[in-house]
Image (spheres, grey):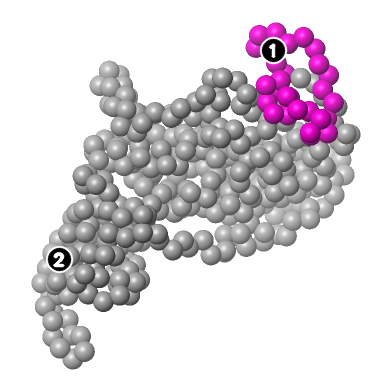
């Protein structure tokens, strides 16, 4: 199901899609455990067409809370809510891959499709997923109503850059098909096309149509798929787009560093008081030490955190270290209630100075880079 019906070419008018209701995370993980017990299988594919980020977060936390060892993948929309920290959480719970619709890789057409994303947003989200170790498969489309030859070429250039930067690992080009129950099929005049209507029988709802652009989209099929095959194998990025086609195409109007520039945009979000804090690491090994602060020797603790293939260490004065370990314990997926940024801030400032200074300190930056997540 495409949550909210944000897709003009999907059959969102059908009851089994538009009346979709997500299952609560606890019930979903109950069913996963039942299937594991019945079959011995621990790999799952959730078949939602656009799994909501909030539900995915809840499912991931429930899996971690129950200490299940599973792998899973699902279909998503590349929404901005897939932050780097959320992607780390999903990976920790066993998510190995996602598939999502980049579709036409053109902001004008993405808006027309009502996809709810932009190319820049897709780039940032796929980077977050990839850096978390989650494979990304992209559904790609050509031949959408009113799509021009230039937009097809520019879409290919966007795709080339995404693969060259390694933030998408798999993809497939689909030629647009008009279906009777999609918003385009129900309101073709809004998209400038003329359907060739025939009696529609069960499981035969594809509709032929005339596109006013007059573009022969079919001729792009071989070149688009050949280039993508090469990009998926990490080769051919240096070739001119013309080399993939046996007919003349215009030069791309997309800057050669467009996607890279999108990734360089500052995506940091200031935590809000209701943002959840989750610690997905282990309890630390604790050792005594001494630090000097303003000329005074102070009792301190070294907290050594061991991970699967690495470890890191932070050092804090003893009172703050004890407080921090208590906060981490309250932030684990198994905690009875989820810790919030506001609660942690209030707890800190009830004993010490401005929390922001501590939040951006070197020990906390190290902790946030290694499993202390803001969701």
Relative horizontal placement of residue 59, taking residue 49 as reference (left or right): left
Is residue 321 visible in this depiction of the protein? yes
Quarter of the image holding residue 32? top left
Classed neighbour count for the residue bearing mark 2: other residues with Cα under 10 Å, few (<14), some (14–19), many (≥20): some
Residue at x 69%, y 28% (from the top left corner): 183
Residue at x 28%, y 22% (from the top left corner): 34
Q: Is residue 215 above or below residue 85?
A: above
**Front-most of 171 and 239?**
171
Q: Is residue 93 magenta?
A: no
Tell me residue 312's x, y (percent): 26, 64
Q: Which residue is mark 2?
A: 322
**Front-most of 102 and 348?**
348
Relative horizontal placement of residue 106, taking residue 167 as reference (left or right): right
Q: Which residue is mark 1?
A: 204
Residue at x 34%, y 28% (from the top left corner): 28
Spatial CA distance of label 2 from label 1 is: 66 Å
Q: Is residue 75 above or below residue 302?
A: above
Residue at x 35%, y 37% (from the top left corner): 59
Farthest bottom residue? 295
Q: Is residue 192 magenta?
A: yes
Is residue 172 visible in this depiction of the protein? no
Tell me residue 198's x, y (percent): 80, 12
Tell me residue 155's x, y (percent): 72, 46
**Front-most of 250 and 85?**
85
Q: Which residues are magenta?
A: 179-206
Q: Is residue 219 above or below residue 80?
A: above
Mark 2 vs 1, N-terminal side = 1
Mark 2 secondary-structure assignment: helix
Tell me residue 159's x, y (percent): 66, 47
**Front-most of 247 and 89?**
89
Mark 1 secondary-structure assignment: loop
């Amino acid at each position: 199901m495409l949550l909210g019906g944000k897709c003009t070419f999907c059959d969102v008018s059908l009851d089994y899609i538009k009346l979709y209701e997500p299952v609560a995370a606890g019930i979903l993980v109950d069913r996963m455990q039942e299937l594991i017990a019945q079959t011995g299988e621990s790999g799952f594919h959730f078949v939602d067409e656009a799994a909501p980020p909030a539900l995915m977060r809840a499912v991931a936390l429930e899996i971690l809370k129950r200490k299940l060892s599973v792998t899973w993948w699902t279909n998503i929309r590349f929404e901005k809510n897939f932050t780097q920290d959320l992607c780390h959480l999903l990976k920790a719970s066993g998510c190995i891959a996602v598939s999502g619709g980049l579709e036409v890789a053109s902001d004008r057409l993405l808006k027309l499709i009502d996809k709810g994303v932009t190319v820049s947003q897709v780039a940032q989200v796929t980077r977050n997923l990839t850096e978390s170790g989650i494979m990304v498969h992209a559904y790609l489309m050509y031949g959408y109503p009113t799509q021009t030859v230039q937009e097809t070429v520019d879409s290919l250039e966007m795709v080339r850059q995404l693969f060259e930067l390694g933030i998408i690992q798999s993809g497939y080009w689909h030629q647009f098909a008009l279906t009777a129950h999609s918003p385009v099929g129900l309101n073709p005049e809004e998209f400038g096309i003329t359907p060739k209507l025939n009696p529609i029988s069960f499981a035969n709802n594809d509709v032929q149509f005339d596109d006013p652009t007059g573009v022969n989209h079919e001729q792009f099929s071989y070149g688009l798929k050949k280039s993508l095959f090469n990009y998926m194998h990490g080769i051919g990025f240096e070739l001119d787009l013309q080399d993939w086609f046996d007919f003349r195409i215009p030069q791309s109007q997309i800057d050669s560093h467009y996607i890279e520039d999108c990734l360089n945009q500052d995506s940091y979000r200031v935590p809000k008081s209701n943002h959840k804090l989750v610690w997905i690491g282990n309890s630390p090994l604790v050792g005594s030490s001494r630090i000097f602060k303003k000329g005074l020797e102070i009792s301190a603790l070294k907290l050594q955190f061991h991970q699967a293939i690495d470890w890191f260490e932070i050092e804090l004065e003893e009172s703050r270290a004890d407080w921090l370990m208590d906060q981490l314990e309250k932030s684990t997926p198994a905690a009875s209630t989820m810790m919030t940024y506001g609660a942690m801030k209030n707890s800190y400032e009830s004993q010490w100075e401005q929390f922001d200074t501590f939040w951006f300190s070197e020990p906390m930056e190290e902790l946030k880079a290694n499993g202390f997540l803001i969701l």
